[in-house]
Image (tube, rainbow, N blue to C red):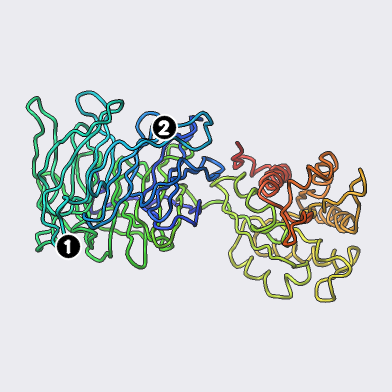
């Protein structure tokens, strides 16, 4: 059932993770095991992007399903195929309404083959349903072909396709105006439109249409319903009217109840048991400003996030821990996020260092991916900073203000001679003193400090890897770690050995490319960020065994 109006436990803690930030016009997110490895991946559909993409769980590597799909609006996975609706516009006269079938090619990670199967004006919502004992694809267009703003007067079709045949079959032309939402409830189909909420059920004599509710009684176009979802006990939650401001609950035998009327452009609704109490909460994606993800338990509203103009949210267990996570895609915010369901707050780890640690040219991204959602990584590392300048610029105090449980500290590249008096330190005196002060202050703030030696510069003299001044700084880190009984990540030793074995040509594949087109042998490219980030994560759990359970390696 939907959580009752009174008397509920506390919601679990949700940890946000940004998966992508380049999905212009993000509209729909779908969970499916795209690469057949037993893990649910995320398919992201964005109307302003011509590529249908998916993100591979757990690394969330971006991969392309197919390109050349303009103005996508919905997709659905059925068996080993994907059906996509594209060529969409709100105005029926300009909306081609292409429906295409996508089938995987020979390369399991490569692009899929695309074949058009239908054109139906304003094809909009696609879902999988059971009809006559077969899984079929339901297509619920937004409006009829003759509809025009503002009242969109026309009847709207509801159709389906049988896999293999892929011929359009009509369910009904009954709803009027805008048909925005669809929900599959067992063998029946629920629609949300200007006409209200209706249930369509197959019978031996055709389809039976039953009115559930008229929705918002206001004059159209601010009438009816926009989206609907059904809880485990048959209770319903709806957004009303179209792109509406209301969250409405329908319980058997009780009148329509508006539990919130303060929203702006609420776009989708879902129900799920987020806390394991066998009662469903309501999840709402608000697309209008300020853009939010909302959770309702009874009449109590929790703002999960205000950093996303949410168009679509789905409840799904993405990490197999039997707790329901939430994945959302944003339209104007262009982002895809996962909110990991945790019983308690995650372990917060702060990274402090230079450009070889940060997210642009350092090992931060791979480190974060290797440790998974149970660890919240805050990367404070900044280009060009040394153990001296990081503190002098006031960057250290904000790290401690965030109250991390662990602080990983790696400096050295910019502490060396030639970096200028505002950055240079001596490895045997001032550098040591800086490290000791970082350790003491982290402990005083309740955090566990972890020291890391700098990653090596990948420069060879012939067949030999060049040794440079970083060795003295690495030696100083090891000595301070031993004296102060501080966990150590000896990345210098590990990357030195890794680079030595690779040789110059292969080692260059780990690095970035400089502006002049030459190999950057200090900073990391995509491959290096992942490989050395993974190395850093393994080195961390070796020094801090309590974190081993958070490893999330493929």
Q: Is residue 495 above or below residue 163?
A: below
Q: Identify residue for label 2.
A: 103
Residue 295 in percent (x, y) is at 33, 54
At which x and y percent is residue 429? Answer: 89, 67
View extreme (left): residue: 205
> SS class of the residue under badge 1?
loop
Tell me if mark 1 has few (under 14), some (14-19) or many (20+) residues whose alpha carbon lies within 10 angstroms of its own. Answer: few
Q: Position of residue 142 (x, y in %)?
A: 22, 50
In x, y percent, where is residue 353?
Answer: 72, 61
Residue holding disc 1: 149
Q: Is residue 40 visible?
A: yes
Q: Residues within 10 Å of mark 2 (few under 14, many from 20)?
A: some
Q: Nearer the viewer, residue 59 or 386?
A: 59
Looking at the image, can residue 230 be seen? no
**Residue at the location (25% across, 56% down)?**
94
- Name the N-terminal-most of marks 1 and 2: 2
**Quadrant in which the N terminus is drawn:** top left
């Amino acid at each position: 059932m939907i959580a009752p109006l009174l008397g509920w436990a506390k919601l679990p803690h949700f940890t946000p993770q940004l998966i992508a930030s380049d999905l212009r016009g993000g509209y729909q997110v779908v969970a499916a095991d795209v690469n057949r490895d037993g893990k649910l991946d995320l398919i992201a559909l964005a109307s302003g992007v011509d590529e249908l993409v998916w993100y591979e769980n757990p690394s969330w590597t971006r991969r392309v399903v197919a390109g050349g799909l303009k103005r996508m609006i919905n997709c659905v996975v059925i068996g080993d195929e994907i059906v996509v609706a594209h060529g969409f516009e709100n105005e029926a006269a300009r909306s081609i309404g292409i429906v295409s079938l996508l089938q995987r090619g020979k390369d399991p990670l490569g692009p899929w083959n695309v074949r058009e199967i239908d054109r139906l004006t304003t094809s909009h919502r696609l879902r999988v349903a059971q009809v006559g004992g077969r899984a079929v694809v339901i297509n619920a267009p937004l409006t009829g072909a003759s509809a025009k703003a503002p009242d969109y007067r026309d009847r709207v079709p509801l159709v389906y396709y049988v896999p293999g045949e892929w011929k359009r079959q009509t369910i009904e032309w009954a709803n009027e105006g805008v048909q925005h939402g669809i929900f599959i409830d067992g063998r029946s189909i629920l629609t949300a439109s200007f006409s209200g909420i209706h249930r369509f059920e197959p019978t031996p004599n055709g389809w039976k249409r039953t009115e559930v509710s008229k929705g918002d009684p206001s004059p159209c176009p601010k009438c009816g319903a926009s989206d609907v979802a059904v809880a485990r006990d048959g209770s319903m939650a709806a957004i009303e009217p179209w792109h509406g401001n209301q969250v409405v609950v329908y319980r058997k035998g009780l009148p329509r109840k508006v539990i919130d009327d303060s929203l702006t452009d609420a776009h989708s609704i879902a129900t799920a048991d987020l806390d394991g109490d066998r009662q469903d909460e309501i999840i709402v994606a608000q697309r209008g400003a300020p853009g939010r993800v909302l959770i309702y338990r009874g009449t109590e509203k929790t703002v999960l996030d205000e950093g996303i103009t949410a168009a679509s949210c789905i409840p799904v267990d993405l990490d197999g821990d039997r707790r329901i996570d939430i994945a959302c895609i944003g339209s104007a915010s262009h982002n895809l996020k996962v909110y990991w369901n945790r019983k308690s707050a995650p372990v917060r780890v702060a990274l402090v260092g230079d450009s070889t640690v940060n997210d642009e040219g350092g090992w931060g991204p791979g480190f974060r991916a290797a440790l998974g959602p149970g660890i919240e990584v805050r990367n404070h590392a900044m280009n060009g900073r040394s153990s001296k300048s990081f503190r002098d610029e006031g960057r250290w105090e904000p790290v401690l203000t965030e109250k991390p449980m662990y602080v990983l500290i790696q400096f050295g590249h910019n502490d060396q001679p030639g970096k200028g008096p505002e950055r240079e330190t001596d490895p045997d005196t001032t550098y040591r003193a800086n490290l000791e002060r970082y350790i003491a202050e982290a402990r005083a703030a309740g955090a566990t400090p972890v020291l890391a030696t700098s990653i090596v510069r990948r420069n060879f003299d012939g067949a030999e890897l060049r040794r440079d001044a970083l060795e003295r700084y690495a030696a100083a880190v090891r000595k301070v770690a031993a004296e102060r009984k501080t966990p150590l990540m000896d990345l210098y030793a590990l990357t030195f050995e890794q680079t030595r074995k690779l040789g110059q040509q292969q080692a260059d594949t780990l690095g970035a490319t400089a502006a002049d087109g030459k190999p950057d042998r200090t900073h990391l490219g995509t491959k290096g960020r992942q490989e050395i980030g993974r190395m850093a994560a393994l080195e961390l759990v070796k020094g801090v065994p309590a974190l081993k359970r958070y490893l999330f390696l493929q």
